[in-house]
Amino acid sequence: VKPILHLSDGAIAVREKVRTTAAATRRLEDLAVEASRDRDRRAGCGVAVHHVGAPDRAEALRARLAERVEHPFEMVVSELSAAVGAHLGPGALGVVVGPHPRRRG
């Protein structure tokens, strides 16, 4: 079982659980696209795909998000620190969707 974690009110919580890595990646992608639709379309949104020792999987996810996110102003891939990786384990993926830093409310 692969947990999908979510940051809510400053705390990390399990949003849902899926059975396979492929299903978790598809669900993560869908959640990121959904989050991007909640952003102001005039301002666009930034998307960061983070990974722990999985640059190819992270880049593939970024490419799929680039096709599906309607108004990205920036999309990056970055490796998480060893401290975070120690908690998540190798192969972990994460996505952050946020507003344009210069156009926040």
Image: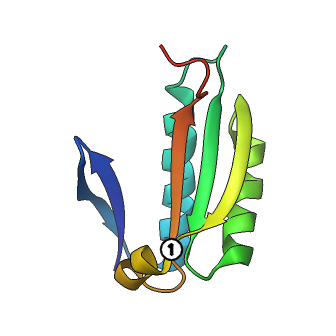
Residue 4: which quarter of the image? bottom left
Q: Residues within 10 Å of mark 1 (few under 14, many from 20)?
A: few
The vertical placement of 5 against 9, above or below, is below
Q: Position of residue 22 (x, y in %)?
A: 56, 74
In the displayed structure image, the side of residue 83 where residue 37 appears, left or right = right
In the displayed structure image, the side of residue 11 where residue 2 appears, left or right = right
Q: At 70% from the left edge and 53% from the top edge, which residue is drawn?
A: 76
Q: Position of residue 21 (x, y in %)?
A: 51, 77
Q: Position of residue 100 (x, y in %)?
A: 61, 27
Q: At 53% from the left edge and 41% from the top edge, which residue is drawn?
A: 97
Look at label 1 and name its amino acid: Ser
The vertical placement of 51 against 39, above or below, is below
Q: At 49% from the left edge and 37% from the top edge, which residue is drawn?
A: 35
The N terminus appears in which quarter of the rendering? bottom left
Q: Position of residue 14 (x, y in %)?
A: 25, 61
**Total count of labels:** 1
Q: At 68% from the left edge and 38% from the top edge, which residue is drawn?
A: 69
Q: How is the image coloured?
A: rainbow
Residue 61: which quarter of the image? bottom right
Dot 1 falls on a residue whose secondary structure is loop
Q: Which residue is mark 1?
A: 81
In the displayed structure image, the side of residue 28 where residue 16 appears, left or right = left
The vertical placement of 100 against 67, above or below, is above
